[in-house]
Amino acid sequence: MGPGLMRTLLSVLVAGALVGAAHAQTASQMPQYSAETVVSYASLAEGPLAPNSLVTIFGRNLAWVTQFRSQWDVAGDTLPLILPGTSVMVMVNGLAAPVDMVSPEQVTFLMPPNLGAGTAEIRLVHAGRAGPAVRVQVKEYAPALYLWNHGVALARHPETHEWVEPGLPAEPGQEVILYATGLGETEPPLEYRQIPREERQIKAWREFVVWFNDEPLPEERLGYVGVMPGFPGIYEIHVRLPDELPSNPQVRLQVGEAVSPEQVRLAVKGFDDPEPEPEDPGG
């Protein structure tokens, strides 16, 4: 083999190696996730998703930066499809969905409120690199409570605006606000990319029940149930707690036949909590 032919052969081999390395590097930078890692942002649990819900994709190579939607990203009452400087888009059945937060391993978006029940195809695109098209189940209702931390429902004292949490529990008979997702269509209905600016009650309020342990909350103790103004994908549930309630009861939401996940409790100082013993004045 002559030197000229040898140089040509080496050039071809080197070029091929470079192309292969570039292809491998590009493949390693592709967004990586699966249908099992597309979950409700409220519960972080697998299962059916609902329209007008915040949904999280967990994976790798989802973004280059970490960024949250800010008030300056909202034009009028229209939610952004791409957060500035992120180059991240989420497609739902070919329709771009509003993006709420991005990071290299997590992206949160709003499931369009006009999405019908059935199977939805989710695909994340980052800087022109398209991740896999995964299919998730969509139902009219998929109730889930937002969590303060694992197993503890996110709630607020409406009068003081303080959070209900183990260090500041609610008491039987008090009013609290629970926060949830997946409660379905509102009256009037929300439009695609619309941020709610006023209260809109859920359409299925006659089918809605709050359960504490195994007891349904009486209807007269249930107040407003609808979207949280200014916060897309979040519903408020105003309740007056039963006058007799044990400590830290399990709380579940039901819309029709759909029920929120188990093992979520509300921080309550119940009637069965032992009273602190009085201090001995004599020391």
Image: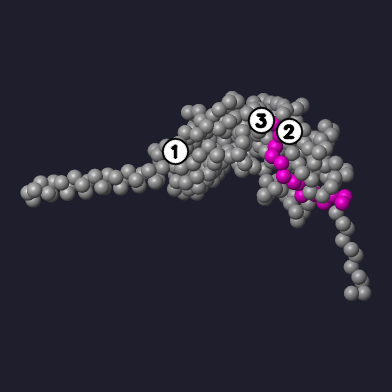
Q: Which mark is residue 77?
A: none
The alpha-carbon separation of the residues under discs 2 and 1 comes to: 34 Å
Q: Which mark is residue 131?
A: 1
Q: Main secondary structure of the magenta part?
A: loop
User: Residue tagged by mark 2?
Assistant: 254
**Circle 3 residues within 10 Å: few <14, some 14–19, many ≥20:** many
**Front-lying residue, 163 or 42:** 42
> Tag 1 or tag 2, which sits nearer the N-term?
1
Residue 80 seen in the current view: no
Start-end of magenta stretch? 258-272
User: Residue tagged by mark 3?
Assistant: 141
Q: Residue at x 76, y 46 (%)?
A: 266
**Front-lying residue, 84 or 144:** 144
Amino acid type assigned to the residue bearing label 1 in the image = Gly
Q: Which residue extends farthest left? A: 2
Indicate the position of residue 20 as horizontal and vertical percent values: 29, 45
Q: Secondary structure at mark 2?
A: strand
Left or right relative to 112: residue 234: right
**Circle 1 residues within 10 Å: few <14, some 14–19, many ≥20:** many
